[in-house]
């Protein structure tokens, strides 16, 4: 499908101009090899036991490697596929069992360059909404990303997910549904996920303004006092007039738990970027307000993010970001977060 205005900005911010290595190519098929290596250092998170105090300065190395292919079956139909891994230099535990992760693993079709369908570990349709303000490498998008009682809304990638997209010129419609995996025993315990689906739509005007809407529903088998079906939705707008970009999203999350317990919040995000030569300057604001009975969690996200990146060459950049967290916990302000990074793509 066509590269959208929002996607173009994200590509600019991430310097995705890197040319993939062509492993095989003829008149009907092409197989690419692509990857990315990153190293980031800074104070990225808070102490779990002292949530107002940031962790010590530290570093983290990671890399991605994947392949993507396109096989032309006939003049109207293409066979598509993608497989990509994420490799972390430092695992979260001594056994390093989480140091290798599959980011994408799917097969699909494209019909007449308009209709696309894929099955496997794919990207959720709600990515259209999140991409409006997702321009940072280290921080940002924390209001839409924040969990409700451990359940994350708008998660970008899901296993066993069917995704469908239909491009009608100025309109781009997408949908996704997470299927049951019949090779596994059916999960029937309270709290196990039953199904999940989402829809999104984007309209791009002739003067390059994106209007986006997205809806997601997660259902669980059985409920508890703190877990139940969750509905999330949002609206967004993005406008690029070179060398400026500005985007904003506004949305709601709501969970219907057991014993008539309801948890909900309202969130909004704003992001802006300005490109000067090889440099990209970024700023964003993220806020989430609780609208339920959790009095101690009225304001759940309140932060300002600043960032700058510099393109060293076509396939490499350095970047730095600062997160001014304005959230108070028990009357005590939180430390600010910060970090720097180097990225090389191929």
Image (cartoon, rainbow, N blue to C red):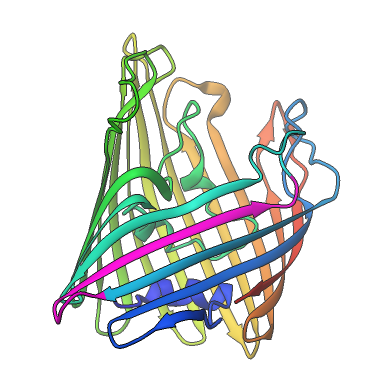
Count the marks: 0
Choose top left, top right, bottom left or bottom right for residue 201. Answer: bottom left
Visible in this render: residue 107? yes
Choose top left, top right, bottom left or bottom right for residue 341. Answer: bottom right
Q: Percent from the top left, x then y, of residue 239?
A: 39, 75
In which quadrant will I find the N terminus?
bottom left
| Residue name at image x 18 percent, y 72 percent | 114
In which quadrant will I find the C terminus?
bottom right
Q: Single out the residue that lies furthest toward the top.
A: 259
| Residue name at image x 61 percent, y 70 percent | 282
| Residue name at image x 53 percent, y 22 percent | 295
Q: Percent from the top left, x then y, of residue 45?
A: 72, 43
Q: Is residue 329 magenta?
A: no
| Residue name at image x 64 percent, y 75 percent | 281
Q: Is residue 229 above or below residue 124?
A: above
Choose top left, top right, bottom left or bottom right for residue 164. Answer: bottom left
Q: Percent from the top left, x then y, of residue 54?
A: 79, 41
Residues drawn in magenta: 72-90
Q: Percent from the top left, x then y, of residue 211?
A: 29, 66
Q: Nearer the viewer, residue 334 or 77?
A: 77
Q: Is residue 85 above or below residue 300?
A: below
Q: Nearer the viewer, residue 304 or 316?
A: 316
Residue 192 falls left or right of residue 335: left
Residue 285 falls left or right of residue 129: right
Q: Is residue 78 magenta?
A: yes
Dominant secondary structure of the residues highlighted in magenta in the image? strand
Q: Is residue 116 above or below residue 337?
A: below
Residue 57 falls left or right of residue 326: right
């Amino acid at each position: 499908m066509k590269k959208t205005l929002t996607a173009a900005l994200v590509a600019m911010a991430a310097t995705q101009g890197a040319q993939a290595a062509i492993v095989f190519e003829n008149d009907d098929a092409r197989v690419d090899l692509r990857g990315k290596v990153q190293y980031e250092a800074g104070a990225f998170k808070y102490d779990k036991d002292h949530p107002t105090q940031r962790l010590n300065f530290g570093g983290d190395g990671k890399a991605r490697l994947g392949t993507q292919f396109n096989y032309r079956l006939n003049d109207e139909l293409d066979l598509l596929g993608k497989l990509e891994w994420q490799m972390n230099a430092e695992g979260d535990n001594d056994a390093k069992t989480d140091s290798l992760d599959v980011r994408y693993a799917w097969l699909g079709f494209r019909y007449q360059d308009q209709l696309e369908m894929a099955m496997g570990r794919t990207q959720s349709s709600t990515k259209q909404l999140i991409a409006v303000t997702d321009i940072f490498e280290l921080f940002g998008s924390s209001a839409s990303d924040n969990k409700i009682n451990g359940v994350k809304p708008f998660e970008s990638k899901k296993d066993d997910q069917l995704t469908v997209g239909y491009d009608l010129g100025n309109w781009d419609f997408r949908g996704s549904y997470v299927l049951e995996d019949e090779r596994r025993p059916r999960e029937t315990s309270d709290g196990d996920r039953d199904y999940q689906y989402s829809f999104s739509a984007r309209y791009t005007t002739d003067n390059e303004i994106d209007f986006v809407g997205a809806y997601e529903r997660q259902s669980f088998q059985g409920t508890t006092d703190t877990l139940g079906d969750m509905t999330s939705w949002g609206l967004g707008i993005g406008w690029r007039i070179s060398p400026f970009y500005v985007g904003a999203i506004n949305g709601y999350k709501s969970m219907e738990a057991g014993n008539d317990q309801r948890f909900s919040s309202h969130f909004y995000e704003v992001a802006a970027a300005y490109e000067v030569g090889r440099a990209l300057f970024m700023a964003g604001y993220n806020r989430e307000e609780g609208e339920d009975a959790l009095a101690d969690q009225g304001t759940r996200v309140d932060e300002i993010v600043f960032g700058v990146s510099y393109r060293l060459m076509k396939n490499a950049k350095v970047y730095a970001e600062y997160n001014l967290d304005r959230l108070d916990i028990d009357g005590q302000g939180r430390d600010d977060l910060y970090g720097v990074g180097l990225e090389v793509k191929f």
